[in-house]
Amino acid sequence: QVQVLESGGGLVEAGGSLRLSCRFSGLSLGDYAVGWWRQVAGKEREGISCISWSGTNTYYSDSVNGRFTISRHNANNTLHLLMNNLRTEDTAKYFCVASSYDGCSASRLPHYSRWGQGSQVTVSQ
């Protein structure tokens, strides 16, 4: 059974930074492409980033490109999202997701699987 331990969310002022982390268990992360969704209550989820098995291919949505950095550490089954220059519109619940198919792209990201409950990120003025 796959489980995810999520951490790093919280409240930050606009312009600040946060680092989200997910530690997966029950799978070998090196066999999965992984990424991040975010969702505001009442709105559609948004796929914001992914990274391929090897880490050589990454994708960022226009809304976060240049501010967020995704990284993975297969040896300890961990995924990170470093979020810099946060804006109020980044306020959302963030979910780490994974796919056993090694495809990292805007079109593949919505098809990833989610196991965790998400981490709330709130950015204040």
Image: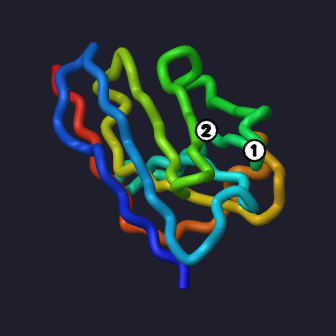
Compared across the picture, whether 6 is left or right of 34 comes to left
The residue carrying mark 2 is 49
How has the structure been colored for display?
rainbow
Compared across the picture, whether 8 is left or right of 84 comes to left
In front: label 1 or label 2? 1
Extreme-right residue of the structure? 102
Image coordinates of residue 85 in percent, x first then y, are 36, 15
Name which residue lies at 27% across and 44% down: 9
Compared across the picture, whether 80 is left or right of 101 comes to left
**Residue 66 against residue 48 in the figure, above or below:** above
Q: Residues within 10 Å of mark 1 (few under 14, many from 20)?
A: many
Extreme-bottom residue of the structure? 1
Name which residue lies at 82% across and 50% down: 103
Q: Quadrant of residue 29?
A: bottom right
SS at mark 1? loop
Image coordinates of residue 38 in percent, x first then y, are 46, 47
The residue carrying mark 1 is 52
Q: What's the residue type where badge 1 is placed?
A: Ser
